[in-house]
Image (cartoon, rainbow, N blue to C red):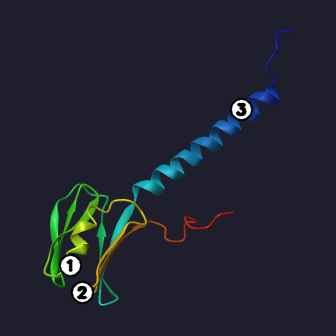
Amino acid sequence: MRNLIKKGDVAIILSVALISCMLMLRDFSHSNKKYANVYENGELKCTVDLNKNEEYEIEIAGGKLLVRNGEICYIASDCPDGTCESFGWLGRVGDTASCVPNRTVVTVVGEDKDAPDAITF
Ligand SMILES: [Zn+2]
């Protein structure tokens, strides 16, 4: 009874380990790449790379956005309700903030927009 683990078992264990490794890497790269689409009047004004550790401001209609540590936020707005500023920091794929009076929208998207994030099998 020396061979408790047979050759075939080793192959199965190795392939399972390999597949889970690949899935982990895929998840890692997927969740790590994100961008913010900034819309003005329903048109894409710019796409912000949220993968860099940079801090800068973006001028938009009626206000300002701040990009910092992979997140984006309305930091100033001349709109009367200030709802856009109350959205806070957006850093996860799917996060969205908007300023209705100024007709601006910010939404965080993943790298591959075809990824089946919203599809349940
Ligand atoms: Zn606003």
Q: Where does the image place residue 72, in percent across and percent down from the top left?
A: 26, 64
Residue at position x 51%, y 51% in the image: 27
Callout 1 amino acid = Asp
> In the rendered image, which quarter contains the N terminus?
top right
**Is label 1's Cβ within 8 Å of ligand 1?**
yes
Q: Are there few (<14), some (14-19), or many (20+) residues within 10 Å of tag 3?
A: few
Residues under numbered marks 3 and 1 in contact, where contact means CB atoms less than 8 Å apart: no
Q: Are there few (<14), some (14-19), or many (20+) residues within 10 Å of tag 2?
A: some
Residues under numbered marks 2 and 1 in contact, where contact means CB atoms less than 8 Å apart: yes
Q: Quadrant of residue 68?
A: bottom left
Residue at position x 27%, y 61% in the image: 89
Residue at position x 82%, y 15% in the image: 3
Say which residue label 3 marks.
13
Look at discs 2 and 1 and give the one toward the viewer: 1
Q: Quadrant of residue 14?
A: top right
Judge whether 40 appears above or below 12 on screen: below
Look at discs 3 and 1 and give the one toward the viewer: 1
Label 3 SS: helix
Position of 21 compared to 91: left or right?
right
* Circle nearer the N terminus (2, 3): 3
Q: Where does the image place residue 91, in percent across and percent down from the top left?
A: 33, 59
Say which residue label 2 marks.
101
Callout 2 amino acid = Pro
Q: Where does the image place residue 57, in percent across and percent down from the top left?
A: 15, 69
**Is label 2's Cβ within 8 Å of ligand 1?**
yes
Say which residue label 1 marks.
81
* Foreground residue among 49 and 67: 67
